[in-house]
Amino acid sequence: MDGILADSNMFTHTMVEKGKGHLGKGSHAKGFGKGAGKGNPKVPKEDGPAAPKSEAEQLAEAYSKAKKMRDLSTIMMSKMQDCLQVAKKSKYWSKSAQKDADALIGKLETSTSALKKVLMKGSCTVDELKAMVLDTAEVVKECQMSCKEYKQVANKTGSLVSKGSKKK
């Protein structure tokens, strides 16, 4: 950098030495991050022990959870019926599996209808609502597991060996 170009500011900002690359403003090269770790870490404020909720607040919260569980159980009912229709078409579907599925659907229907009745009446304690919601949740979980099994049965195919022996 001799001569006329040595006096100009043209090269001072872009290249300092050969192989160093651009030293432009605002570069986030590897290892520098975008400000992570700067300053004090955010610590959540602790207000101490939470104030206990009143009976009315607890009851309102329990009713809202019961409504959500009612909706979830009705959705699960339709999913179960769809899964059963698909599984019935499979050649691996048995009569005992059908009996189990019918019993499970009946169980789901009774828990859903009981939950609906309680929600329509509107007079129930928090503990009763919690118990009903937990019972319905267990049945819904059973139904979800059964739906997975039904889908596996529906998608099950015979082995290649058995297919080959049937063609002969």
Image (cartoon, rainbow, N blue to C red):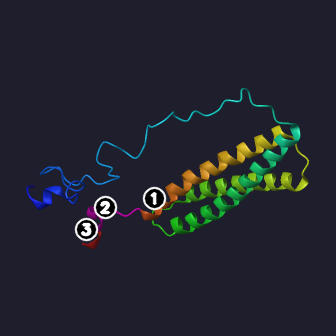
Residue at the image position 23 percent from the left and 55 percent from the top: 22
Q: Amino acid at mark 1?
A: Gln
Give x and y (percent) for residue 17.
14, 49
- Side of 158 where 122 appears, left or right: right
Q: Which secondary structure, mark 1? A: helix
Callout 1–callout 2 Cβ contact below 8 Å: no
Judge the density around disc 3: few (<14), some (14-19), many (≥20) Cα neighbours within 10 Å: few
Q: In front: mark 3 or mark 1?
A: 1
On whether residue 162 falls in the magenta region, the answer is yes
Give x and y (percent) for residue 151.
49, 61
Between 23 and 79, the residue placed more toward the observer is 23
For marks 1 and 2 on the same chain, the one whose residue lies earlier in the sequence: 1
Numbered circle sitting on residue 152: 1
Between marks 2 and 3, how big is the CA–CA gap? Answer: 9 Å
Between 156 and 120, the residue placed more toward the observer is 120
Q: In front: mark 2 or mark 3?
A: 2
Q: Is residue 123 above or below residue 43?
A: below
Check the image and name the residue furthest to the top. Answer: 48
Residue labelled with disc 2: 159
Q: Which secondary structure, mark 3? A: helix
Residues in magenta, as a range = 156-163
Give residue 166's quadrant in the image: bottom left
Q: Amino acid at mark 2?
A: Ser
Report the number of numbered marks: 3
Between marks 1 and 2, how big is the CA–CA gap? Answer: 15 Å
Residue at the image position 75 percent from the left and 49 percent from the top: 65
For marks 3 and 1 on the same chain, the one whose residue lies earlier in the sequence: 1
Q: Is residue 43 above or below residue 157?
A: above
Residue labelled with disc 3: 164
- Side of 87 where 15 appears, left or right: left
Judge the density around disc 1: few (<14), some (14-19), many (≥20) Cα neighbours within 10 Å: few
On whether residue 151 falls in the magenta region, the answer is no
